[in-house]
Image (cartoon, grey):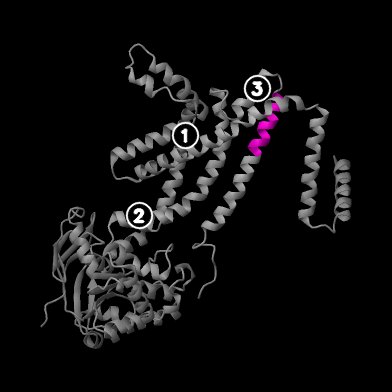
């Protein structure tokens, strides 16, 4: 058993009176693909966003590739350097792509490596072009995001995250904002990444994809992990009634 | 009445029929030419005083460089104040926000002409009160052009605060999250993601503010008569009993200046929207 690369211990998050995460614990081993699913409001996105501290946890502990941080609400500024360390190890892909519209595709990719890691521009460009080739968009390197389709934008977003050479990748509903015919090309890229052994946490509604790619599926219900297991096990016979009902509804 | 309406209708029909072969732009050009001829006729009918123009024209026109200098200085100061004002209004600090809100409310809530006269006349009065410390005499007495830049800059800065605030907020929050997720600090995010995009939103309205300031700069002439274009026109016009000639000249010059800058403003707006909303198509 390898040492987990992501450790989530008793994670809690509340927004004012609303308790969104009520003590989530999860270990992810290197190379695993964890698919988190559940109803809207179950806390899936919040859980993911706590891993790289885009949300500030109110309780519990996060550890990513050896960098460990206890929750300390409203102490974000004091710990920003540590948070940055974690963020450099974790690449994130958003539902709304969030590309920088004032930069071309290749400039989007090399912005962070050059500014944050002070990589030489030429090296970053070379790696960036390789990544664009990998996601099938090499010829769009000098295009501006406004001219790309949704599927293309998301693939650029994935390449941009990969350009920082992260240890893990976080996907927050990567295909939910895409027209149906554009979903496949993005899932293809994610599938390739999984095959190459990238550790990933994916929040998605694409259950067919989850079944195919996930090492483990985690059902989140009202801020807690209700059930988890291998895709085949969960889908053929989940232990909990609520898990079964949810899976029946979506599959 | 019905009779007049019907006659006008028939006249319009005949004009339309007679000119139906011409493109609209040519017809428009004819209208402009007609107005220009009308203006020349007016000048001749009212015996526009050419001798006055030859003698005092150069002096009045000599105010143009000062008008422009005051406006460039004023807009620059306004932009600095607007940036601080916007950051202040968006700030989480109660002190910053309070000061910014007061600045915007007070300056927008008082007339520009009052602010100009305050700087030119009220501040020197305060400087020379017996109870005032001596250093106020150096601080509150400004060179004439400098006071103009100060007045216009402070006034326009309060209005442009809204422009700058909107520009900063126009940058989608998701991008800031993405920048943070990539490991960028707040400073890096502001410098590389927010400001470059905010600038594109801010520049066109700022150009319009400059053009408005060209006209507002005339108010300086109420306080100081020999400095910029209008002040000189008013001074010589009233002094030489030729207000029509002097003010007509000034009006023409303002019109020319605003037209020239408006032309460049449109070109600038077209260039700015390069990477943005205007481009359609793409791979859908």
Give the mark toward the camera: 2 or 3.
3
Same chain for the residues under marks 2 and 3 in the image: yes
Q: Secondary structure at mark 1?
A: helix
Distance between the alpha carbons at the discs numbered 1 and 2: 27 Å
Q: Earlier in the sequence, mark 2 or mark 3?
A: 2
Mark yes or no: residue A95 visible: no
Q: Do the CB atoms of the residues marked 2 and 3 lie less than 8 Å apart?
A: no
Distance between the alpha carbons at the discs numbered 2 and 3: 50 Å
The image position of residue A195, as x and y in percent, is 27, 86
Residue depicted at x 38% and y 37%: B101
Q: Which residue is mark 2?
A: B191
Depth order, front residue of B60/A136: B60
The image position of residue A221, as x and y in percent, is 23, 71
Residue depicted at x 54% and y 66%: B279
Q: Which residues are magenta?
A: B243-255
Q: Which residue is mark 3?
A: B236
Q: Do the CB atoms of the residues marked 1 and 2 lie less than 8 Å apart?
A: no
The chain under label 1 reads B
Q: Earlier in the sequence, mark 3 or mark 1?
A: 1
Q: Secondary structure at mark 2?
A: helix
Classify 10 Å Cα crowding around label 1: few (below 14), some (14-19), many (20 and above).
many
The chain under label 2 reads B
Q: Which residue is mark 1?
A: B155
**Quarter that holds the N terminus of chain B:** top right
């Amino acid at each position: 058993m390898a040492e987990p690369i992501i450790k989530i211990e008793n994670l809690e998050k509340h927004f004012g009176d609303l308790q969104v995460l009520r003590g989530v614990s999860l270990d992810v081993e290197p190379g695993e693909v964890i698919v988190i699913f559940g109803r809207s409001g179950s806390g899936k996105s919040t859980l993911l966003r706590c891993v790289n501290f885009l949300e500030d946890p109110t309780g519990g502990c996060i550890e990513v590739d050896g960098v460990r941080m206890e929750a300390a609400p409203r102490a974000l500024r004091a710990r920003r350097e540590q948070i940055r360390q974690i963020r450099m190890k974790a690449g994130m892909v958003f539902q709304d792509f969030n590309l920088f519209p004032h930069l071309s595709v290749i400039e989007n990719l090399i912005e962070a490596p050059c500014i944050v890691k002070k990589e030489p521009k030429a090296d970053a460009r070379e790696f960036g072009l390789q990544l664009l080739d990998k996601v099938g968009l090499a010829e769009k390197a000098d295009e501006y995001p406004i001219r790309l389709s949704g599927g293309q934008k998301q693939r650029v977003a994935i390449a941009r995250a990969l350009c920082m050479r992260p240890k893990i990748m976080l996907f927050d509903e990567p295909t939910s904002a895409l027209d149906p015919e554009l979903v496949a090309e993005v899932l293809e890229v994610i599938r390739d990444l999984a095959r190459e052994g990238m550790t990933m946490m994916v929040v998605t509604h694409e259950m067919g994809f989850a079944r195919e790619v996930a090492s483990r599926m985690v059902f989140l219900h009202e801020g807690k992990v209700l059930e988890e297991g291998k895709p085949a096990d969960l889908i053929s016979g989940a232990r909990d009634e609520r898990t079964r009902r949810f899976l029946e509804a979506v599959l | 009445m019905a009779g007049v309406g019907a006659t006008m209708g028939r006249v319009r029909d005949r004009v339309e029929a007679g000119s139906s072969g011409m493109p609209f732009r040519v017809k428009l050009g004819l209208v402009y030419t007609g107005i220009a001829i009308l203006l020349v006729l007016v000048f001749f009918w009212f015996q526009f005083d050419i001798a006055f123009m030859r003698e005092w024209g150069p002096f009045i026109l000599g105010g143009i460089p000062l008008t422009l200098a005051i406006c460039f200085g004023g807009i620059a100061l306004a932009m600095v104040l607007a940036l601080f004002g916007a950051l202040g209004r968006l700030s989480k600090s109660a002190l910053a926000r309070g000061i910014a809100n007061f600045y915007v409310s007070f300056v927008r809530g008082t007339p520009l002409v009052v602010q100009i006269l305050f700087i030119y006349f009220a501040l020197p009065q305060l400087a020379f009160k017996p109870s005032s410390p001596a250093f106020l005499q150096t601080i509150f007495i400004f060179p004439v052009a400098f006071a103009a830049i100060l007045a216009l800059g402070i006034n326009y800065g309060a209005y442009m605060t809204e422009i700058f605030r909107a520009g900063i907020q126009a940058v989608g929050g998701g991008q800031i999250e993405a920048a943070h997720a990539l490991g960028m600090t707040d400073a890096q995010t502001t410098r590389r993601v927010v400001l470059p995009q905010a600038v594109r939103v801010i520049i066109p309205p700022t150009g319009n503010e400059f053009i408005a300031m060209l006209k507002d700069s005339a108010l300086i002439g109420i306080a100081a008569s020999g400095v910029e274009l209008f002040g000189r026109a008013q001074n010589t016009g009233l002094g030489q009993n030729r207000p029509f000639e002097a003010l007509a000249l000034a009006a023409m010059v303002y019109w020319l200046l605003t037209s020239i800058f408006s032309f460049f403003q449109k070109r600038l707006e077209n260039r700015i929207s390069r990477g943005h909303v205007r481009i359609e198509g793409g791979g859908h």
